[in-house]
Amino acid sequence: MEWRIKYIFNFTEEITWKGGYFQFGFHDYKGNSYVIRHSKHWLGELIKNDEFTWTAGSIDPKLSEVHIPFDLKNPMYISRSPIDESLAISSGGNNKVFKLFPDEKKVDIFIDMKEYGVNDIGNCVFDKEGNMWINEITGCRLWQFDSKGQKKKVLGNGKPGFQKESTNFDDVQFNWIYDIRLGPDNNLYILDSRNYAVREIDFEEEKVKHIAGTGEPGYSGDGGLAKKATFGSNTNEKFDGPWSMALDKLGNIFIGDTHNHVVRMIEKKKKKRVIATIVGNPEYIPSLRNSVDEKDLLKINLPKICSMDFYNNELFIPEWDGDLIVLEKND
């Protein structure tokens, strides 16, 4: 599978959107686009010509005639419910998940994770049944809630651990879960970052399966089986290990291998998963912005890859310093 650079956009401190996202941007299953300003405590639905249908959050950025105020602190993720089509928003600064109904200009607290002693929530992802999954990052646990916000399951005992074999829900352990995404097979995929691994929740078998990574850091394995690959580490960073993950409609997995400064693709081939680097350069230059005219995938500078997204055959790669690189398949 070949890729090419569709466009590169250099964001400035003033932030113009130009059809892209800075750091955090997501599409829902209907194709609607959302921008999250994590440090500014707001989010919004983006349409054409840099316009917002609405914004919402603690701060009104004055970018839309419609702003919906609520107690949003450091938003992390947004997803659409398959049950009532509300928008679920994880608010990492106060460890709450909100439900937003934009047409009604209404916001409800859906889940307050502080009630469960959780202080570091990540994503809020719906499964096909309308249950919600929340990753407790440093707490090394996954939480499942039903469509009414009632707790159903907790995976992980809160202590770091790793199993390479398929593991029952009751016995599984993780080590700092940075990202979770629903796959096209309706299983949940987990970026088990301090285990330098990718794992899969198989709902039918009620097992957690090992997809990629040896459990040790490094930069190896390209061209071979993903289970034998290693991912980057930087023990001087608060968040060690890879930071971001996305999946396409075929179930191929994209890993923002943050500390190797590359994006790697785990491709399904005859039931085997093979890994390769598709963009980036391990010999990165801190704070160097990419030229908008760059066409060489392996010359792209990715000092700090954050929250990726895949939609409509395009892979969105936000870089923390302000570049957005968008790749498309070169068929």
Image (cartoon, rainbow, N blue to C red):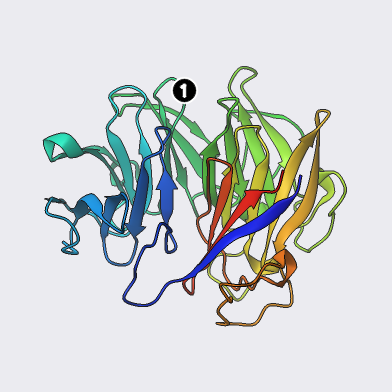
Determine whether the residue tagged by mark 1 lies in a helix, strand or loop: loop
Left or right of 96? Residue 56 is left
Density class for disc 1 (Cα within 10 Å; few <14, some 14-19, many ≥20) is some
Question: Foreground: 305 or 195?
Answer: 305
Instruction: Give residue 48's position: percent from left, percent from top.
Output: 32, 51
Residue extending farthest right: 224
Q: Residue 285's quadrant in the figure?
A: bottom right
Question: Foreground: 296 or 318?
Answer: 296
Depicted 267 relative to depicted 49: above or below: above
| Residue underneath mark 1 | 128
Instruction: Give residue 302's position: percent from left, percent from top.
Output: 61, 70
Residue extending farthest top: 204
Quarter of the image that includes the C terminus: top right
Q: Residue at x 44, y 62 (%)?
A: 23
How many numbered badges does the structure rendering display? Answer: 1
Instruction: Give residue 94's position: percent from left, percent from top.
Output: 28, 55
Q: What type is the residue that disc 1 sits on?
A: Lys
Depicted 109 relative to depicted 122: above or below: above
Q: Residue at x 76, y 57 (%)?
A: 277
Q: Residue at x 32, y 60 (%)?
A: 74
Q: Is residue 230 visible?
A: yes
Quarter of the image that includes the N terminus: top right
Q: Is residue 242 visible?
A: no
Left or right of 99? Residue 31 is right
Q: Residue at x 84, y 48 (%)?
A: 228
